[in-house]
Amino acid sequence: MKSENNIQTPRQGKATTGIIFLLLGVFMLAKTTGLAADIPDWIISWPMLLIIIGVLSGINHQFRRPGAYFMIAIGGVFLAERIIPGVQSHDLIFPVILLALGLHLIFSKKLCNKAAVHS
């Protein structure tokens, strides 16, 4: 049985998303105006936005759907290119896809087996 304290209302989800967008806007404005020149470029990037959207989606669906994991993985692949010198995202895409697919198959099968046992 689910506890009502763990259920996020649509209003809470919008507020969380709004706070994240506000923080992102503050970081971008501070970086553009030179007030925070030491903020790394990768923090304010589209791969980081994919990761944030993936995490929010995962939280909203209690990480039961694979879409959140794929968004986090894709964002992570492209973010690695910005953080780690010499890493190119096209070298990482296929291995990460295989890892994500394998994890999805392993964990979705366990969930199906648990559901069958408890029925």
Image (spheres, rainbow, N blue to C red):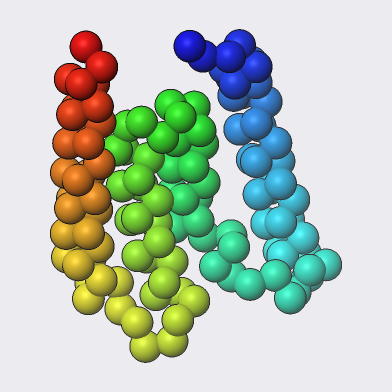
Image-quadrant location for residue 18: top right
Q: Position of residue 117 (x, y in %)?
A: 20, 21
Q: Which residue, as the protein is rendered here, is positioned at the far right?
A: 35
Image-quadrant location for residue 104: top left
Would residue 102 appear left or right of 11 to someone viewing this image? left
Q: Please tell me which residue lies in front, 107 or 39.
A: 107
Is 87 placed above or below 60 here? below
Q: Residue at x 78, y 68 (%)?
A: 36
Is 97 placed above or below 6 here? below
Would residue 110 appear left or right of 78 to someone viewing this image? left
Q: Position of residue 102 (x, y in %)?
A: 17, 53
Q: Residue at x 17, y 20 (%)?
A: 116
In which quadrant will I find the C terminus?
A: top left
Is 9 placed above or below 97 here? above
Residue 41, can we see it? yes
Would residue 42 appear left or right of 102 to someone viewing this image? right
Q: Which residue, as the protein is rendered here, is positioned at the far bottom?
A: 86
Would residue 112 appear left or right of 87 to someone viewing this image? left
Image-quadrant location for residue 40: bottom right
Is 13 placed above or below 56 here? above
Q: Residue at x 25, y 17 (%)?
A: 118
Report how many numbered discs are placed on residues in the image. Answer: 0
Q: Please tell me which residue lies in front, 40 or 2.
A: 2
Q: Residue at x 17, y 36 (%)?
A: 109
Q: Position of residue 103 (x, y in %)?
A: 24, 50
Residue 10, can we see it? no
Q: Which residue, as the protein is rendered here, is positioned at the far front?
A: 117
